[in-house]
Image (spheres, helix red, strand yellow):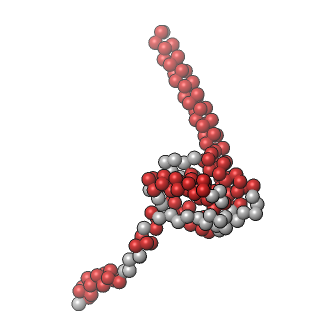
Amino acid sequence: MRILLAALLPLLLAGCVVSPPAEVQEEHAVVPDLRSDGSSDVGAVLAFYARTRKLSATELVREQDLARRALTRSRSDGNRMRYALVLTVPGAPAADETRALETLEPLTRNTASPLHGLAVLLTTLLQERRRLDVQGQGLQQKLDAMLELERSMTGREGSAQRKR
């Protein structure tokens, strides 16, 4: 009896699972537009970014194009933030931090904007990432120079020993 109950219990519980509505399952494919009147709150922007990070490469390229068009139509704070965020998603095929910084610049100057603080934070992070990239490139050049020096020294020692 216990064996039969143990075998039926998972089947009964599986029947109780309610699947989420189709609109929730496809939420990652549909990215809502931020309000274009500039009154977007930081929570909506962060929710937008969380959804954007889950997009596939092709969906992300499409979202970048949509955000660019929205910014062209209306240069609102929400559209600026939306475009800057889709340009900075890690692993994005068309990531452009320079363009994102240019897009955020008016927001960082406008202290009255509800997105000012987030724009300053994002700008600071992008500038720090850029600084670290430059520093990493400098370190890589130094490492390459040291490796070349080591190769040249190893080559001379080997040729000097052969002559004797």
Q: Position of residue 157 (x, y in %)?
A: 52, 17
Task: Say whether residue 77 is left or right of residue 86.
Answer: right
Q: Where is residue 110 in the image (x, y as percent from the top left)?
A: 75, 58
Q: How many marks?
A: 0
Farthest residue, direction top: 163
Instruction: Depth check: give the residue in front, 68 or 88.
Output: 68
Residue 149 visible here? yes
Residue shown at 50% from the left, 50% from the top: 92
Task: Say whether residue 33 is left or right of residue 22.
Answer: right
Residue shown at 56% from the left, 53% from the top: 68
Residue shown at 60% from the left, 56% from the top: 73
Task: Say whether residue 30 is left or right of residue 101.
Answer: left
- Compared to residue 52, the image places residue 98 above or below, namely above
Residue shown at 52% from the left, 53% from the top: 65
**Quarter location, residue 143:** top right
Farthest residue, direction front: 73
Residue 6 visible here? no
**Quarter location, residue 36:** bottom right
The N terminus lies in quadrant: bottom left
- Compared to residue 76, the image places residue 11 above or below, namely below
Farthest residue, direction bottom: 1
Q: Position of residue 75 (x, y in %)?
A: 65, 56
Q: Position of residue 4 (x, y in %)?
A: 23, 86
